[in-house]
Image: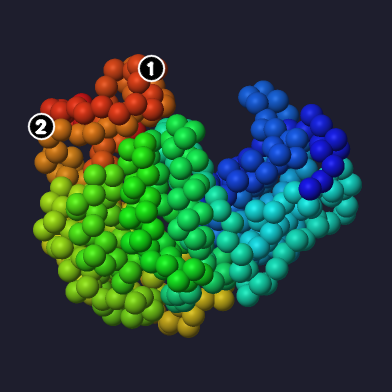
Amino acid sequence: MTDRTQFEDKKAAYYTLGCKLNFAETSTIGRQLLAEGIRSVRPGERADICVINTCSVTEQADRRCRYMIRKARREHPDSFVIVTGCYAQLSPEEVARMDGVGLVVGAEQKLDIAPYLEAIGRPTAEARLVHGRTRDIHSFHLSSSSDERTRHFLKVQDGCDYHCSYCTIPKARGRSRNGSIASLVEEAERIVAAGGREIVLTGVNIGDFGRSTGERFIDLVRALDQIEGLDRLRISSIEPNLLSDELIDYCATSQRVAPHFHIPLQSGSDEVLRLMRRRYDSALFRQHVEHIRRVLPEAFIGIDVIVGTRGERPEYFEDCYHFLEGLDFSQLHVFSYSERSGTSALQIQYTVSPQEKHRRSQRLMRLSEAKLRRYYERHLGRPQEVIWEQGCYEGLMLGHSEYYLRVAQPYDAAAVGTRSCVTPHQLLEGEQGLYLR
């Protein structure tokens, strides 16, 4: 613990990029700094400290991180800038050379920034590096956050033991590890006691839960499902080879676990899946989707797809497109392949031009839009349990149903954070995308 008096009246601004796991961790950093006497900056105030939690999943993400560092410096020109997260872990020297950066914090030290705050107020010519090697990343820090819409994200797992050919996440996050079921239940109970209505389980590879403790992910889900006062439990992205029929069947019988599955496919071509070093094939993926539809016919099924990877020849993309075209999913999340230094994918000779990546991406997004619209349409006239969220959009407030559908009603500040059952009869489209009313 540092001397709180040296941080009296200090204010911090927080910037987060990337996944919901990062948002959960930024919230934890904010709580730690508050314990040191450093409060969050209010609108119109200048911050003394800027904490930027970065992502590095693509080159575009790296560019976004560099932009955010410059933005923080413009908005808070005299602040001490701390950069952490995946970009800081993978490219610490590059980050340290950026103008105004005072401290670069690696993944292992990310959630223990307080001891390094002594550097504040003592600027040097170069940023100080607090950075460890990937193999040194072994601790698990419990984290949770709220997106201010009554939905809370609970970090249950970190790191990844998989080494997909295109991915740098294992280098940025270290090996798979997790908290215990007991500690996560305790944190979830704290969230509910503080007014949280919905908890989303998040991590790098949450289906791999149990590496550290010898427990199973489904047992974690069962334990959290028993928490009194929790309205809804939602599972975030889970790898196809780790999604079991046992888990799907449990979700079908639970009153709290949302009928919502987010499954990264990455490609519907088995040839591309092999080049990616994924641990499943398209047949297994199809089996999972069909099983979900048998036991949870109306469930939301979101799918991640990467287009334009090295080795994705035109015929392989066509295989992917036709596979998805015949699959009963709800929405695609489409990403264009981005080359990452140090990945084995760079050894694959065949490359796809940026123009072709864009064409393929647009084609899949049109397919996704059509599937999503049909998914919304088939829920018209069906009761939805909606938890209402903050925000007013043209006189309307939005909430998400258990099926991850956006539903709208006239804005009522008193309804924020409450749950109600509504039966929508209209499909509309606004700034926030499709919604039911």
In front here: 154 or 181?
181
| Residue 297 in picture, x, y percent from top left | 13, 51
Identify residue for label 2.
381
Q: Work out whether 25 lies above or below 163.
A: above
Q: Residue at 63% of width from left, 72% of height from top? A: 134
Which residue is depicted at the point 63% across and 75% down? 135
Q: Which amino acid does the dot numbered 2 rest on?
A: Gly
The residue under label 1 is 414
Graded by Cα atoms within 10 Å as few (under 14), some (14 to 19) or many (20 or more), the crowding at tag 1 reads few
Please provide percent x and percent y for residue 400: 30, 36
Residue 411, located in which quarter of the rendered image? top left
Residue at x 73%, y 56% (from the top left corner): 104
Whether residue 389 is visible: yes
Residue 399, can we see it?
Answer: no
Amino acid on which the number 1 mark rests in the picture? Ala
Q: Which mark is residue 36?
A: none
Q: CA distance from mark 2 to mark 1?
A: 26 Å
Residue 88 position by quadrant: bottom right
Q: Secondary structure at mark 2?
A: loop
Position above or below: 403 against 419? below
Residue at (22, 73) in percent of width and height: 284
First of labels 2, 1 by sequence position: 2
**Dots 2 and 1: beta carbons under 8 Å?**
no
| Residue 95 placement, left or right of 233 | right
Q: Nearer the viewer, mark 2 or mark 1?
A: 1
Position of the C terminus by quadrant? top left
List x then y, in percent, for residue 426: 15, 28
